[in-house]
Amino acid sequence: MAIARSWPSLSLLLWARVSGLLVAMLVLSWALGFRESFLSPAEESHIYAVLHPLLMVIGFIVLSGEAILVHKASGEWSMSSKKTVHLSLQGVVLGLGVFGVWTKFQGFNGWVGNLYSLHSWMGFICLFLFAAQVLP
């Protein structure tokens, strides 16, 4: 049975997808255009410092949101198609998250230098909880 969609819900769905695409394009243009991070000019910037925020924003924010939208708001698709696309997107998000953490540790601070902030520990917790969703 098809669910009738109202104009406000369709416009909100369109707004969510356009804003996600805009965020991805802005971060991608920053990463490709400037090729440097927000470090002070005295510190050397590596490509790994740019890849980490790029992969995390595109992966965890944009593609994870798209996976939610596909699962909840994909109208006429069958349930198995929704689940397949949702699971595929979530797998890509998990892969990008793991690769994003790996790129952060390949930078100039090494492994231990990146484990002193609350940001890094919260990132590990988020990545662990995201991966734990796969468990039955």
Image (cartoon, rainbow, N blue to C red):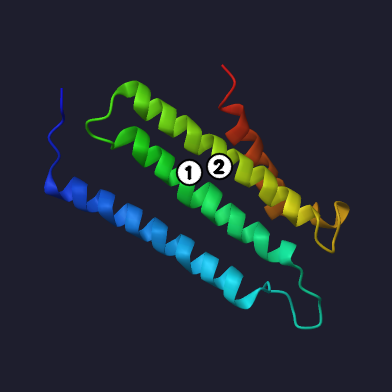
Mark 2 secondary-structure assignment? helix
Residue 85 point in image, percent of width and height: 42, 33
Q: Residue at x 59, y 60 (%)?
A: 54
Q: Is residue 6 visible?
A: yes
* The C terminus lies in quadrant: top right
Give the CA distance from mark 2 to mark 1.
Answer: 6 Å
Q: Residue at x 27, y 49 (%)?
A: 13
Rendered position, 132 above or below 68: above
The residue indicated by pointer 1 is 64
Mark 1: few/some/many CA within 10 Å (<14, 14-19, 20+): many
Mark 2: few/some/many CA within 10 Å (<14, 14-19, 20+): many
Name the side, left or right, on which 117 lies relative to 60: right
Residue 69 falls in which quadrant of the image? Answer: top left
Query: Marks 2 and 1: CB-CB under 8 Å?
Result: yes
Name the side, left or right, on which 136 lies relative to 66: right
* The N terminus lies in quadrant: top left
In the rendered structure, find residue 10 and report the number of the disc placed on it: none
Q: Is residue 117 visible?
A: no
Q: Residue at x 27, y 29 (%)?
A: 77
Residue 131 point in image, percent of width and height: 62, 32
Q: Looking at this view, name the residue that lies furthest to the bottom.
A: 41
Residue 7 point in image, percent of width and height: 13, 48
Name the side, left or right, on which 115 lies relative to 130: right
In the rendered structure, find residue 93 and report the number of the disc placed on it: 2
Q: Nearer the viewer, residue 136 or 93?
A: 93
Type of the residue with mark 2: Val
